[in-house]
Amino acid sequence: MEPENLKVLPLHKHPEYLKACCEMINEEWPRSETARMMSLQASCNELPTSLILVANTKSLLGHCKLTAIPSIPESCFVETVVISRAMRGKKLGTFLMKRVEEYCKSVLNLKMIHLSTKGQENFYVKLGYKVCAPISIYGVRLPSHSYSSAVSIKLDNPVAINPITQTVPGAFPPPPPPMPKILKNTDNTIKSNKTYMFKYL
Ligand SMILES: CC(C)(COP(=O)(O)OP(=O)(O)OC[C@H]1O[C@@H](n2cnc3c(N)ncnc32)[C@H](O)[C@@H]1OP(=O)(O)O)[C@@H](O)C(=O)NCCC(=O)NCCS
């Protein structure tokens, strides 16, 4: 498909694509339609922003979501990058990411893009992304000594403190429930099986 027949648009300015976008993403990563629609309807001029790839024929071809990273305000986190199944391998993902980068630079005035992936590393390497230390999109920079997939991150404070009473477990009132197993293992480390990548714009 020729580039002149393609457009990358903010989803919130084209709500007519909401339903198709929800279905395309849920085909790849199944989730309740309500939750997915709520996430997509949060798109706005500030972050989060969902950008969609559409053809002149008015068909939806792809999607990508930009989320703020509170600890790195000069960057954003790119997630839910997807090209519709029938259209993969035709350089549309490359086209979408290039336009997303232009949007981040010229509209949002950002200097970097971060993302995480499991299995699509080569796609991003070809676009110039480099592996970096894991980052948290919830406002905390994770230790810089941990890189790439299957990394271990030492917890700074392995003792759980009740956030209300500031007391340690065993004291009154009872301690909070244990951390989910997926996040905690016997040596107090967090395992990340994703590869974190970034690119300067
Ligand atoms: C990943 C995805 C967005 C790529 O889009 P696409 O339009 O198929 O990719 P392109 O055609 O632009 O591919 C560009 C290059 O990356 C390579 N590539 C694409 N997907 C790849 C993958 N999964 N593994 C390795 N290389 C890949 C292509 O071979 C191509 O290389 P070339 O330039 O040497 O020919 C698409 O395959 C997709 O939607 N996948 C499912 C959802 C997903 O996993 N998203 C990523 C979440 S992090």
Image (cartoon, grey):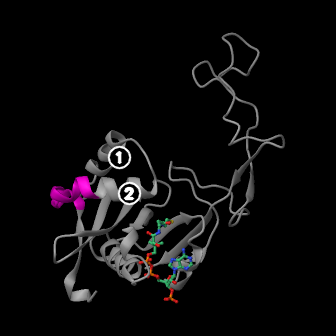
| Residue tagged 2 | 25
The quadrant in which residue 62 appears is: bottom left
Side of 42 where 81 appears, left or right: right
Residue drawn at 29 percent across, 65 percent down: 51
Mark 2–mark 1 Cα distance, whole angstroms, equals 8 Å
Q: Residues within 10 Å of mark 1 (few under 14, many from 20)?
A: some
- Dots 2, 1 in contact, CB < 8 A: yes
Residue 48: in sight, yes or no? no
Residue type at mark 2 is Ile
Q: Inspect this view and state whether residue 163 appears.
A: yes
Instruction: Judge whether residue 19 is colored magenta.
Output: yes
Where the C terminus falls, by quadrant? Answer: bottom left
Residue 10, relative to residue 41: is it above or below? below
Give yes or no for residue 33 being in the magenta stretch.
Answer: no
The magenta segment is: 11-20
* Marker disc for residue 36: 1
